[in-house]
Amino acid sequence: MPSTDTMAFGGPSPAVFVHAKRRSLAAHLTAYALSAPALFLMALLLIGPVLVVLMMSFTDYSLGNASFEWVGLANYAEMLEDDVFVKAIGNTLLYVGIVVPASVFLGLGAAMLIESLTFGRAFWRAVYFLPVMATLMAMAIVWEFMLNARFGMISQLLALLGLPAKNWLQETSTALPMLMVIGIWQALGFNMVLFMAGLTSIPRDLYEALELDGGSSSWSRFWTVTWPLLSPVTLFVVVITAIRSFQVFDPVHVLTKGGPNNASMVLIYQLYQEGFDFFRSAYAAGLTVVFLIFIFAITWVKSRVMEKNVHY
Amino acid sequence: MAAVGIHAIQKSFGSVDVLKSIDLAIEDGEFMTLVGPSGCGKSTLLRIIAGLETQDAGSISIGGTAVDKRRPSARDLAMVFQSYALYPHLTVAQNIAVPLRMRNLTMTERLPLIGRLSPKAAGKRTEIDRQVRRVAEQLDIAHLLDRKPKQLSGGQRQRVAVGRAMVRDPNVFLMDEPLSNLDAKLRVHMRTEIADLHRSLGTTFIYVTHDQAEAMTMSSRIAVMMEGDLIQVAPPAQVYDDPADIRVAEFIGSPKINILTGTVTEHGAVGCNGVEIGVQPECPVGTAVKLGVRPEKLEIGAAGPGRLTAEIRHLENLGPDMLVHLRMRDETDPIVARCPAERLREARIGDQVGLVFSAGDVLVFDGKTGRRLPSHCTAPVQEKLHA
């Protein structure tokens, strides 16, 4: 107590005061010094490039040009007029809107089915997890063969049923839905594994308590215990899947190149085309900013929901 | 309220026989405690009664009806789990309401929005709320109704678990070590509360514990289990004073009963460490026996011929009483005597003292099987032997 009194009222011992202040300054400096490497790397590798991209989106820079002009919001204005961009945004949102719920619920379903098995769990886990481990590029080629109109497995099967063969990836009406199927197929296994971890962490006691409390149907087990206790996992899975779906690129690049007639154009693929096919770096930078806004929005919603609802 | 019958229940997990044909009749309104060391099968037996585990053979009846084919929810039981098993996402009020919601509301009435539409359901909901409040007030947790389990202390969680069990007036209460997660002080307090609860509800209680003190203090009867067998079923006093087996004698009572080894002599008495003790067990001469003497029946006197002697190794002062830890020559187990503290003013560690006890307080067990042997005193009971 005496020493704080001295400090608070500027008492007779300035030496103590100065010493304490110097020490706290030293402590602060130490803290900054220790976090400096991490801060420096974050600025260099994350924040810096984002700022550069943001600045570039206000110019007319093209890759290879020696100079550039500031053009203000011209790139963004152009986007609103750009049919490809409007199509890409629409397709991307549709893709996310279908792939996220489908892969989340199918993943949950697969996890619960596999967990309820008495034997063969490891086999089914491996089957569903295989697409996650395989390179999507390679898997896209497998899909291309399966969907081939002449000798593809799927077309052959349909032919057996007397249905007409279709060039699934080359038709306007089916190209995007096919990419969604591949997206779901790929995300499902990852989501399943996360849900499985969540399921095993639910205490068995709760199911037993519910059973004695009168909830013996699988319906009430799911709604009273499984679903609420999985909610932290579900939120995480939804966010991860949403971010990954926004980034869909590989199958588009390998299978459709955004076509036919931009029917399967998505945001990242347009970004790639503008930046690396047409060398319109500034416009591509503008598209990147739009993409980052979506990602930030998802992350923000996640942290808000996390704070409010899902804590136990 | 109902009686519970356990008939020839057997259960094995793999090659391990967890329950070896258990028979037990629990009377209506009784507080029956299943007690035994961990791994003796008591929890398994409780879970079989609840229907959470299926027996390999035998039958369970509740209120005279066999319930083996019924699911746990149809047996009309309530259970308090060791972990309390509270739903973490529900408030205290919602937790207590779950058994009523599950039984009194239909599936559509339980739905979040649609369930609100039916006027009949609204009436049921008000009734549920009333019941929850009644139970909460009875258990003194009414001020916690809006909290989540995470925000409660261990003792409060325990009360919520009890509240959830009693809200529905079940036939039988099952409790699986409900106090083992509480600190020592609270545990002693909750013992009284649970005993009070049993008195006020009058329902049959089946209580599982490994703590002999809980068994002794709360039960109408105690069922002592060891290695899958039921060894003795009796009221607490009888289990303590008249144990049927050396394992029961050793398990019940703290500090543990003192065990001395001896042999039946030609005179029919028991020779122990060269001293003849005046009990006459009903068995042939030369039989190896074990003698049990409770610490509080043992007194410390002067060492002398014809008296068991031991050395004081440690003194524990409990306030009114003193625990005297002794070591006897040729006996591996230490001996403990519980004596009024004022009689031991002179005692010092390292002293050689004589053990004084009445032959009537000696329990004789078979040296091999551990079964209790009937015995009678050769000296009159009133007279302190060796005194």
Image (cartoon, coloured by chain):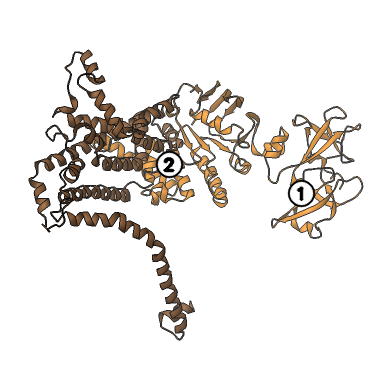
Chain colours: A brown, B orange
For marks 2 and 1, give the one nearer the viewer: 2
* Circle 1 SS class: strand
Q: In the image as oriented, which residue stretches furthest toward the left?
A: A81
Q: Position of residue A137 (x, y in %)?
A: 29, 34
Front residue of A192 and B128: A192
Q: Residues within 10 Å of mark 1 (few under 14, many from 20)?
A: many
What mark, if any, has residue B337 been given in the picture? 1
Residue type (three-letter) at the residue carrying disc 2: Leu
Q: Is residue A216 visible?
A: no
What mark, if any, has residue A171 been given in the picture? none
Q: Choose top left, top right, bottom left or bottom right for residue B107.
A: top left
Residue type (three-letter) at the residue carrying disc 1: Ala
Chain for disc number 1 = B
Question: Mark 2 — residue?
Answer: B86
Front residue of B379 and A200: A200
Q: Is residue B77 visible?
A: yes
Chain for disc number 2 = B
Residue at image point 15% right, 44% down: A278
Q: Choose top left, top right, bottom left or bottom right for residue A30.
A: bottom left
Asked if residue A29 lies left or right of residue B339, the reply is left
